[in-house]
Image (cartoon, rainbow, N blue to C red):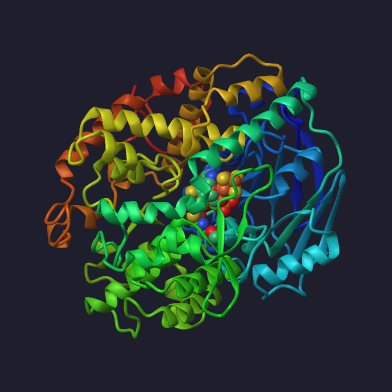
């Protein structure tokens, strides 16, 4: 088998044991890698209903066949587990040297089981595995932990680590790597923390098995140069993702004031142009020639690397329009290892609840200084407020009550990313049907919707586009594993990916072969939900109710007075389910399962809920 190492490293933190396992060609071809490998493993190995923060959950690091090879933007890694935030399958995709190092150590997947009794650093070097004490850095932030690791193992080692957020089981704690990379929004850092796993360090020295390494080397080098040229020509990485803020403000899709408003006259103060002016450094992932991490000096003089989601959720959503303060909030999230999107959503919800008199508190929109303190409380779970904030907005709304669920901006428990969809039905569908909760990564349909369709329409074309993008973004890039930005942002055609895949595996796949893998993964993610939540209903695929609430409509701007229509959204959801071959509850039918090669999984799922023919 070429392209895959064919090996899995299984580590038990309770027993401090490890073993190397192999996987079959059939498994490789059916699930390909990354999200596919992680999901199938969690489906097969987790007992239904387990506590995501208990030792029975498994933390997975999964790579794909093109991960780590020298080709455009292949330095990404999937981290996955049952999510403590949503209760469903959870994952994230971050840039890290672990990608290349783990593949060179001879593995395509690492499965971490059990829980250590003391803070632990898991050290992997080729066939060696060590369980090392990490008490010295337990309680420290990710920057100090990274420095401590680099001093011992060098800067070339692959590193994944957590901050105080993960240690204290904040439910939206992420896994961190490199200077500003962060992934695993649905609490993957908390799963590491629950296992007392402070860090994973990987070094590898073996070649990645490839069918035609010479061809791949030449092809990869040439394509890296071409992508670099395309990026330079388009000027994308000058503002990178942060360029989106001005556009969202213009089209009235910016998160402002817990998404009560869709634009703000001060938005320009934190936009991509201001960020580029304030830039002090640029960072990126390995094997990337279009580095997109813009670092600025924060309010306290520290370096802070920002993306659009960070300025949208910690800036405009909280009405904090001083760039260096937004930088500080972002720095703290990175250091504590908290997801910036959820942190901004949670603080926005808290300020909103106080503003509406539903909870007592001293936090107001625009108060960057207090927001910093609240992030600390949330990361450390300090006091009642810290504990409440650490649980995410779905649980906060349940606790606060008084109708506050109506303005808690989450789907399935995961806070909505920085696109305010009061009048973007297609993007709302994308958030609603995202299988890990409200993440834009699955289908960023908003630019298509606003530029190429009637904005306020609910036609089948929008459901079709959401599925097309889910196949590519939530599918292909998450199991073959590469950063999607060359394709999304500079026009690097998808056709390049089967070429890389075939060159290193020796197979002859076309893009059509890939789409079926993505559909299989999406269907199994739905079975995973059914298994964890037998009372599943289509309402779980609804976006936040605030977007349907006319009392919550923006009062000025291009969409003044308009909100989404629930009945029409239901129609759009029907189109989506129909196109996917799912029933009216949003569960794949038996026939769909058979077509996707999921007969066994369908039989297992039926123990938790009836499947339609
Ligand atoms: C991703 C989510 C995003 S998506 C952003 S900004 W974005 C936020 N970044 C955070 C951060 O930074 N610090 C922090 N403490 N929390 C953060 N939470 C948020 O996390 C990221 C880039 C970006 S920047 C995006 S869109 C693309 N995402 C990709 C993806 O999901 N898959 C893929 N194959 N390629 C992608 N390329 C792009 O990668 P999650 P990263 Mg992240 C400071 O993982 O869980 O999906 O959350 O990975 O290495 O940081 O790169 O405008
Ligand atoms: Fe990483 Fe950005 Fe490069 Fe993608 S474009 S690989 S997120 S630096």
Q: Quadrant location of the C terminus?
A: top left
Left or right of 120: which side holds 599?
A: left
Q: Position of residue 200 (x, y in %)?
A: 74, 56
Of 204 and 190, nearer the camera is 204
Identify which residue is drawn at 32% across, 36% down: 448
Q: Is residue 20 above or below residue 216?
A: below
Q: Residue furthest front?
A: 233
Of 243 and 612, nearer the camera is 243
- Figure quadrant of residue 300: bottom right
Q: Residue furthest top?
A: 508
Of 590 and 1, nearer the camera is 1
Q: Is residue 299 above or below residue 152?
A: below
Q: Quadrant location of the N terminus?
A: top right
Left or right of 320: which side holds 547?
A: left
Of 321 and 421, nearer the camera is 321
- Figure quadrant of residue 403: bottom left
Q: Position of residue 487 (x, y in %)?
A: 50, 34
- Figure quadrant of residue 348: bottom left
Identify which residue is drawn at 63% across, 68% down: 163
Identify which residue is drawn at 37% across, 29% down: 611
Q: How many marks?
A: 0
Q: Is residue 358 above or below residue 515?
A: below
Whether residue 588 is visible, yes or no, is yes
Q: Position of residue 368 (x, y in %)?
A: 41, 78
Q: Position of residue 181 (x, y in %)?
A: 60, 56
Whether residue 341 is visible, yes or no, is no
């Amino acid at each position: 088998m070429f392209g895959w190492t064919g090996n899995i490293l299984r580590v038990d933190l309770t027993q401090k044991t490890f073993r190397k396992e192999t996987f079959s060609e059939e498994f490789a071809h059916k699930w390909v890698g990354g999200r596919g490998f992680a999901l199938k493993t969690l489906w097969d190995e987790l007992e239904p209903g387990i506590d995501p923060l208990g030792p029975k959950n498994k933390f997975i690091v999964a790579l794909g066949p093109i991960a780590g090879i020298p080709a455009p933007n292949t330095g990404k890694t999937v981290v996955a587990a049952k999510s403590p935030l949503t209760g469903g399958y959870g994952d994230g995709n971050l840039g890290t040297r672990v990608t290349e190092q783990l593949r060179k150590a001879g593995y395509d997947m690492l499965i971490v089981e059990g829980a250590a009794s003391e803070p632990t650093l898991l050290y992997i070097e080729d066939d060696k595995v060590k369980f090392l004490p990490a008490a010295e850095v337990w309680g420290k932030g990710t920057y100090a932990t990274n420095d401590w690791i680099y001093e011992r193992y060098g800067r070339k080692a692959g590193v994944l680590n957590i901050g105080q957020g993960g240690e204290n089981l904040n439910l939206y704690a992420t896994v961190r790597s490199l200077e500003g990379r962060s992934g695993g929004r649905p609490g993957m850092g908390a799963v590491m923390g629950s296992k007392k796993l402070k860090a994973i360090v990987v070094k590898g020295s073996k070649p990645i098995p490839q069918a035609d390494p010479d061809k791949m080397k030449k092809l990869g080098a040439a394509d890296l140069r071409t992508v670099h040229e395309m990026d330079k020509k388009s000027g994308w990485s000058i503002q990178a993702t942060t360029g989106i803020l001005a556009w969202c403000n213009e089209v009235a899709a910016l998160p402002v004031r817990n998404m009560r408003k869709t634009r703000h006259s001060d938005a320009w103060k934190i936009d991509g142009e201001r960020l580029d002016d304030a830039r002090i450094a640029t960072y990126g992932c390995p094997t990337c020639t279009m580095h997109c991490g813009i670092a600025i000096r924060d309010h306290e003089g520290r370096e802070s690397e920002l993306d659009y989601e960070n300025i949208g959720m910690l800036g405009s959503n909280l009405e904090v329009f001083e760039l260096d303060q937004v930088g500080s909030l972002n720095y703290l999230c990175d250091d504590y290892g908290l997801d910036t999107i959820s942190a901004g959503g949670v603080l926005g919800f808290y300020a909103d609840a106080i503003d509406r008199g539903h909870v007592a508190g001293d936090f107001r929109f625009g108060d960057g200084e207090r927001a910093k303190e609240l992030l600390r409380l949330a990361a450390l779970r300090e006091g009642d407020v810290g504990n409440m904030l650490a649980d995410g907005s779905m649980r906060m709304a349940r606790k606060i009550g008084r109708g506050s669920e109506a303005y808690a901006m989450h789907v399935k428990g995961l806070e909505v990313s920085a696109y305010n969809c009061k009048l973007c039905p297609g993007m709302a569908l994308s958030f609603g049907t995202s299988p890990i909760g409200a993440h834009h990564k699955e289908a960023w349909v908003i630019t298509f919707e606003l530029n190429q369709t009637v904005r306020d329409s609910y036609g089948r074309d929008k459901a079709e586009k959401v599925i097309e993008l889910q196949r590519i973004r939530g599918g292909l890039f998450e199991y073959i594993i590469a950063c999607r930005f060359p394709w999304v942002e500079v026009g690097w055609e998808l056709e390049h990916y089967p070429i890389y895949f075939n060159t290193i595996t020796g197979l002859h796949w076309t893009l059509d072969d890939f789409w079926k893998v993505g559909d299989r993964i999406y269907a199994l993610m739905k079975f995973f939900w059914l298994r964890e939540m037998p009372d599943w209903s289509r309402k779980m695929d609804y976006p936040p109710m605030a977007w349907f609430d006319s009392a919550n409509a923006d009062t000025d701007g291009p969409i003044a007075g308009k909100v989404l229509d629930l009945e029409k959204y239901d129609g759009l959801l029907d189109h989506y389910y129909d196109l996917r071959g799912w029933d009216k509850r949003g569960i794949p039918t038996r026939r769909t399962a058979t077509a996707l090669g999921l007969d066994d999984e369908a039989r297992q799922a039926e123990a938790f809920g009836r499947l339609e023919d």
